Amino acid sequence: MSWGWTVIEESEFAVLYDASTCWVVEDKTTRNKPVKFTGETKTLKNIAVDFAQGSDGMPIFMRAYYPKDQVEFRLVKRAFERLTQDRQREFERLKDMHESREAYGYG
């Protein structure tokens, strides 16, 4: 879903892009959903974040835009790594739950 952005790093669950004036961290599990709204931080660093809407009506992270002139790359890289780790844990939890259901005949 890169819109011509350059992929810097990609994992099973996330992508880190170079998008000219900013770096973008995108969640691959939600990127095909429509953007419900975009929020911005109101600090010295103007980070914008796109959100989708979950089935429960709650916002779900889609991607974050980190301005290169305001945010160090190491912080963006860490955000990419955290997103990857969080989604990996979530996937493993769901996989374990599914396997447990099958083992007890609920699947």
Image (cartoon, rainbow, N blue to C red):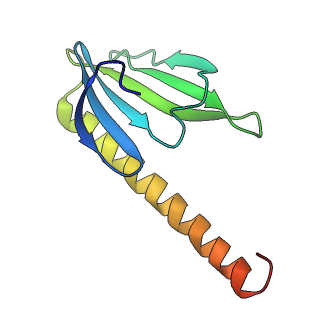
Answer above or below: position of 77 versus 99: above
Residue 41 placement (x, y as % from top left):
45, 19
Answer above or below: position of 88 versus 66: below
For the N terminus, the image quarter is top left
How many numbered marks appear?
A: 0
Residue 32 sits in quarter: top right
Residue 8 placement (x, y as % from top left):
21, 35
Residue 44 sits in quarter: top left
Q: Residue furthest right?
A: 106
Answer with left or right where residue 102 lies relative to residue 82. right
- Residue at image position (39%, 56%) is 85
- Residue at image position (39%, 20%) is 47
Residue 100 placement (x, y as % from top left):
67, 81
Answer with left or right where residue 66 lies relative to residue 105. left
For the C terminus, the image quarter is bottom right
Residue 86 placement (x, y as % from top left):
45, 54
Answer with left or right where residue 105 lies relative to residue 97. right
